[in-house]
Amino acid sequence: MVTSVVCRPRRTVRRTHNTFTSRWFNRIQVPGQQWSRFEPLGFAHLQIQLALSDVTLSLNAAAKTIKCLQIAAGAIYSDKNHNWTAIYNAKIQALESIVNEAGGMWLLITRNMTLKDC
């Protein structure tokens, strides 16, 4: 028995403005103006979301990694103005709790070093 599999090429967003707009938008020239207006085609929204889904996941993963590094350092940025909140004491309390719960078992504890620590 012979079977065949047909694979569709993966949809991508494209690298240039012209290929992006020509694929998912209808270009409407405004009379008497040098600029154009773009209206999305009916299928554009879903296809753009699908094409960007892996990028969105990567960005979310990077944001979570950065937040974990901030927690490990003992302070987190708490707003968009880069104000920070110290959480070092909470981190130490959480470590004490883990040590107590381990009940004498071995633990491996790491610390994120910076040049200021040397």
Image: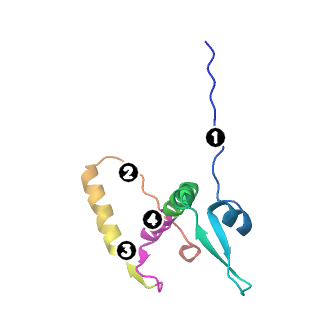
Residue topped by disc 1: 8
Q: Which mark sits nearer the N-terminus, 2 or 4?
A: 4
Q: Is residue 56 left or right of residue 8?
A: left
Tell me where residue 40 sits by quadrant. bottom right
Is label 1 or label 2 in front?
A: 1
> Do labels 2 and 4 touch, CB within 8 Å?
no
Residue with the mark numbered 3: 88
* Mark 2–mark 3 CB contact (< 8 Å): no
Q: 69 and 100: which one is in front?
A: 69
Q: Earlier in the sequence, mark 3 or mark 1?
A: 1
Which residue reaches farthest front? 31
- The residues bearing labels 1 and 4 have C-alpha atoms spaced at a distance of 38 Å
In this rendering, the count of numbered labels is 4
Q: Secondary structure at mark 4?
A: helix
Amino acid carrying mark 4 in the image: Cys
Tag 4 residue? 68
